[in-house]
Image (spheres, grey):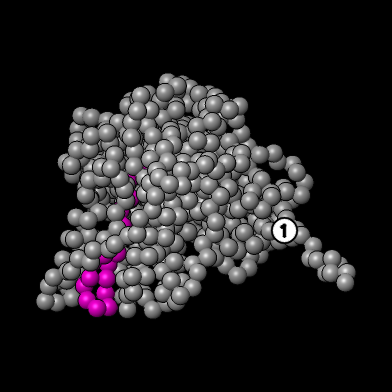
Amino acid sequence: MFNFLKRKRPPSASEIISRVFSETLGMDSVDPNANFFELGGDSMLATIVVASLDEAGHPLPSTAVFDYPTINGLTHVIESGATPPSAGFARTIASHPRNSSGSTRMSASVLQERLWPYERNPDPKRFQPRGEGAILLTGSLNVKALEVSISLITERHEVLRSSFSEEANALHVDIHTGQPVRLEIRHASGDTPELRRADAAEIVAKATSGTFDLRLGPPSNVALIKLSETEHVLAISMHHIISDGWSMGLLVNEIAIAYEALNEDANPGLPDLPYQFADYAAWHREWLTSDAGCTSVDFWRSYLKGGTPALEVKLPSDKPRQTTFNFPVRRSAITLDNKVQQDIRSLAKSAQTSVHTVFFAGFLFAFRRLTDCAELPVGIMHANRNTPGTQNLIGFFSTLILLRFEFDGKDDSIVRLIELVRDTTREVEPHSSVPIGTLLDEGIVDTLPRVFVDSVPRPSMPSINGLVLEDFPFDHPPLFAVADIALFLFDNGKELSCLLGTNEDMFSDKAASDLAHAIAGSLSNLDPQTDPVD
């Protein structure tokens, strides 16, 4: 009797934000006045916070965590109702009916359409855009449970069992019924553990670099290599047309969850997916022509008007450009010792910003010293997962967006550059759902950016009872790209590493080395008062 009196009150905005912060940052509790970015947050995690709060009934602009990086700050915004959703904020996505007795044909996304011309007739000599990785599994492996786990995840995500077809100049995705996965175990050879690991690395390199025929599918591949009774390597590759960097981490995590549960005769308990990537693709196509989408396109038209064309940007190269697409890229690892890593994190904390922002500013610091340019357009990848439900989906969501940096030469200290990166990123963030292909079609830009900077979070390996999971090193496929300079920061939460890619047609060994040295130098001397242009 009177059980209704025992009902709990709904959680307050502050309690919901506290839970979301704790879950996103992997912490038991978070001080309501602690800065999200000081606690290890970054732009990708901020995206998760915004999407999670929207799912909880508190929609916010995509820039909210940048503007109000504390629990108390976001609570005030929600309770005051002072900040309306941004122009790019998403609507509810509907799930379309599927054919239960056979394949289902749906329209491809606008992003997938941009890749298709290069994949229509794949050339085995040309690198296909993909994500690849390998995991060393140490312990007693239940191969059958692993096969069932991969089958379950393939059934869960339609993109993993899809193919592509073209009809009347329109690209379609054919979604097929799931089939059980059968792992062919390949055996590494060698008389010693070292030789077997070396052979396994070669097998992984071949397994992850094969050509995908997207007309036949599937656009992903999984291989298992046995080194010994207690050591196996799981190699995974997915074509970029159905995945992005976020997707790879999600795939590994869900396989781990399913495997651990099935190995213990339990239900994996993965959260339901309210819709699939093809449903998102249909929504996104409609959104681009909606009032909100047109507002974002108009923003880009105004924001990029009068900017220096990408092909006219002065680069620190010493050879003429030969092509603007699919050229060989030279890799240069940039060493960041412990002190440099600590300095980057410390400066991010004192500036109340992300490690990515400080890293980006360090690059601008170096670039200005080498070229003394007045303006620099830079491309960055955006996760584009602000829409509720997209966080748990494998798919090609990420968008390439353009940032314009103008330098007046009066104050180019690292502090000013950090402010410039932060303010510029916040300005374009609400409009990140517009793909650069749309800007090309609209004549807003005439080519892809020639300079690209990205931070790639590398989440820690999931844990599985009875197994130890570690990254397995191997030679990744050669890089072919569209940016003449591509700089990547990898952050696993503990260590930072940096990789520079340069267009081999434009940069000699010396020019590439000079650029790498300049970037390393700027990151090693993060003096807030230093001016990069002496």
Residue 91: give x, y in percent of width and height: 61, 39
**Residue 24, image quadrant:** bottom right
Q: Is residue 238 magenta?
A: yes
**Residue 471, image quadrant:** bottom left
Say few, some or many: other residues with alpha carbon within 10 Å of mark 1 (under 14 / 14 to 19 / 20 or more): some
**Residue 142, image quadrant:** bottom left
User: Residue at (45%, 67%) from the top-left corner?
Assistant: 257
Asked whether residue 252 is in view, the answer is no
Depth check, front residue: 78 or 199: 199
Instruction: Report the number of discs.
Output: 1
Residue 320: give x, y in percent of width and height: 21, 29
For label 1, the SS is helix
Relative side of 404 to 353, left or right: left
Depth check, front residue: 280 or 218: 218
- Which quarter of the rendered picture does the N terminus lie within? bottom right
Residue that badge 1 annotates: 14
> Looking at this rendering, what residue extends furthest in the front direction?
101
Relative side of 498 to 84, left or right: left
Instruction: Give the residues drawn in magenta, as a range.
Output: 224-246
- Which quarter of the rendered picture does the C terminus lie within? top left
The dominant secondary structure in magenta is strand
Relative side of 379 to 415, left or right: left
User: Residue at (33%, 35%) from the top-left corner?
Assistant: 165
Q: Which amino acid type corresponds to the residue marked 1 in the rendered image? A: Ser
Asked whether residue 180 is in view, the answer is yes
Depth check, front residue: 16 or 29: 16
Residue 327: give x, y in percent of width and height: 22, 37
Q: Is residue 376 magenta?
A: no
